[in-house]
Image: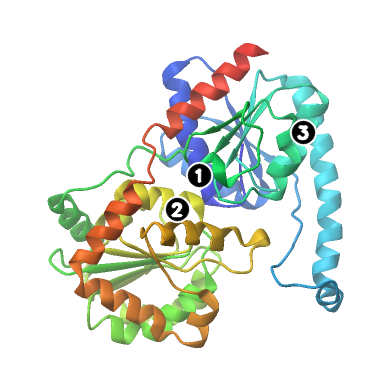
Amino acid sequence: MGGGSGGHVTPVVAVVREIWKKRPRAKIDFWTDKKYYKNARKITIENGMEIDIKKVAAGKLRRYAGFSFMDYLRHFDIVLNNFVDLFKTIGGFFQSFFRLVFKRPDAIFLKGGYVCLPVGLAARLLRIPYVIHDSDATPGLTNRLLSKKAAKIATGMPLSYYSYPEHKAEWTGIPISEEFRPVSERKQRALKKELGFDPEKKLVLATGGSLGAEDINLTMREILPELLKKASVMLVAGRERYPDMMDLKDYEKWEDGELKSNFRMIEFSSEMWKLFGAADIVISRAGASTMTELSGMAKPVIMVPNEELPGRHQVKNAKAYEKAEAAIVVSDSKMMKKPELLLDAVTHLLRSERDCDKLSANLHSFTKDNAAESLAETVISVAKEK
């Protein structure tokens, strides 16, 4: 199970596919949070998966990097929302407990995120074995709480980044769908054409994930006129942020169903591999699942990590890639003060094919091709040991 973002759902889809390859008769349920339920259904349906999806009540603990105790007192709405979500989590625990009593699964796969906490706690009480997976270089709060009683722990980064017991931890990598693989130049041109762009022109893709990243969107608004002089541009604004960016549709020109401009903006796509495959340069947050998909496709990436997330896990992810010369990192806070920092980074890569090739190769070295298969085998083995 997983939820909260596409980064928690798409890896589950990849693991489920592998489980069904090995155990075609396996009965699998997918639980997710209310907020992402519709998107989870869409992702699974578009991947041709007939799977029972259920909602789980859950609440998150809102914590922000750099916030002091007094900051939280000054933002009473945060404290109030945390209090309300505590009761959602308690409700989710009882909901999960009674479901699990009835279902009694052989094993549970918990991808991470706050929605997994009530399920994991209920599973622990009922002595149902569960496997957790950490994508980021820094474990999230939910996984830290659930790791002690987990049957197995899988990680997206090498074990040196974590303090998990070695006897039950394994570096599997992050599972991604098989479509996230390098494409040929011929295929890239075909994908550009399918999206409506000139196949001979460089394409810059900016994305903040399925929900969107406000800072990336706002910066793209500032630099777009100049950037369009240098390349075609596609912006994935995100389902939550898209309505706020409708003014950019003025740059998007259509005629008889064909794109007549070198700019296009969409909410999101369940076929992100096509967008990544078409792109020459990608601007992205530093979410672990997205970076693994881009790693699988060997793309030159400019990362703008979210600096306000708890534990600053995206910043730590970005540092790992930057140290390996696998991505260019632009500070979110500095970019908001000086949008041309992002423009300069893109312009540099547009002019330097050598640097693009180096970034692509180094990023691709982070890929573990059998991550989904390894995780599927781990879940199956835990179910057998029950």
Relative to residue 60, is residue 174 depicted above or below?
Answer: above
Q: Amino acid at mark 2?
A: Thr
Residue type, mark 1 in image: Met
In the image, which disc is placed on residue 96?
3
Q: Which residue is mark 1?
A: 157
Query: Which residue in the structure is indicated by mark 2?
Result: 290
- Front tag of 3 and 2: 2
Distance (Cα) linking label 1 and label 3? 30 Å
Q: Earlier in the sequence, mark 3 or mark 2?
A: 3
How many neighbours does mark 3 have within 10 angstroms: few (below 14), some (14-19), or many (20 or more)?
Answer: many
Q: Quadrant of residue 266?
A: bottom left
Secondary structure state at the residue bearing disc 2: helix
Give whichever of discs 1 and 3 has the lower sequence position: 3
Q: Residue at x 26, y 71 (%)?
A: 349
Real-space Cα separation, disc 2 to disc 1, in angstroms: 14 Å
Left/right placement of residue 160 relative to residue 183 reads right
The x, y position of residue 13, in whole percent, is: 48, 36
Which is in the foreground here, disc 1 or disc 3?
Answer: 1
Q: Between tags 2 and 1, which lies in front?
A: 1
The Cα–Cα distance between marks 3 and 2, rounded to whole angstroms, is 29 Å
Q: Residue at x 40, y 82 (%)?
A: 341
Q: Looking at the picture, how far across and down is residue 85, in whole percent?
A: 81, 55
Percent across and percent down for residue 78 are 80, 68
Q: Secondary structure at mark 1?
A: loop
Q: Secondary structure at mark 3?
A: helix
Compare residues 142 and 56 and report the one nearer the observer.
Answer: 142
